Amino acid sequence: MTTDENRTEKKIEAKDVETTAATSPGCSMDLTLAFLVLRGWLAVRAILAGLEKFSAFKTIQKPFVDPTTGMEDPSGAMVEIKQKFYSLTNYSGVPQSLKDKFATEPMLPHAVSTPFYGVLGYALIALGLMLLLGVGTRISLFLQGILYIVLTAGLILIKQDDGVAWLGIHVALVALALVLARHNRFTLLKKW
């Protein structure tokens, strides 16, 4: 047997093993469940990251409560408490500290970055909901991957290496989900 024939035979055997493993009933269900877990995590991550763009903190004053008695302090002492709240008026696509760094980067023109900041939160929420509900699952995953790549490029330019690493993990998870997408069994629009 020649070397080429030997390689061809080994490839055929490997494909037979791969096909058998991928088509066995237990394996198919395992892959479906793996995709559902990954799809759920990526969807929740995108939705919550988008919602956080609408959050802010306000400081409120409350009467001091004595921890031993559970009663308000009779002297009228007050404590300041930071309270998180969500509102459309709080929207900020990117924190001001990052906007300031991006503003000094010549490869990020203001004409491109400003509209990006304006749609980032809404895009994350929409893509997360699409993924969670199974509406255009592959399209949602692909667009999330592109969004994370764009965010990564910005962070590379301002030398935020920790953020680049986190986004790299997100891109890898999106790529894995795209590979597993053929095992998607629970969806509203299967074709996409």
Image (cartoon, rainbow, N blue to C red):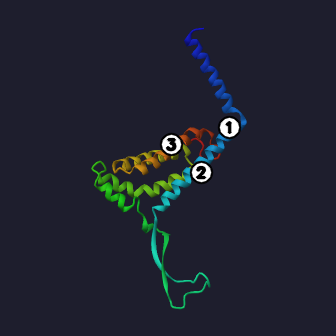
Single out the mark in the foreground, 2 or 3.
3
Residue drawn at (51%, 91%) of the image: 75
Q: Which mark identifies residue 28?
A: 1
Q: Earlier in the sequence, mark 2 or mark 3?
A: 2
Residue 169 vs residue 38, the one in the foreground: 169
Quarter in which the N terminus is drawn: top right
How far across and down, in percent of the image, does residue 173 sit?
A: 53, 44
Rounded to the nearest angstrom, the CA distance separating label 2 from label 3 is 15 Å
SS category of the residue bearing label 1: helix
Element assignment for label 2: helix
Q: Is residue 104 above or below residue 34?
A: below
Report which quarter residue 177 is drawn in: top right
* Disc marking residue 4: none
- Residue 187 shows in this picture: no
Label 2, residues with CA under 10 Å away: few <14, some 14-19, many ≥20: some
The 10 Å Cα crowd at callout 1, few under 14, some 14 to 19, many 20 or more, is some
Residue pointed to by mark 3: 172
Please name the amino acid that badge 1 sits on.
Ser
* Residue at (39, 61) in percent of width and height: 95
Q: Nearer the viewer, mark 3 or mark 1?
A: 3
Number of marks in the rendered image: 3
Q: Position of residue 23 (x, y in %)?
A: 68, 32
Residue behind mark 2: 40
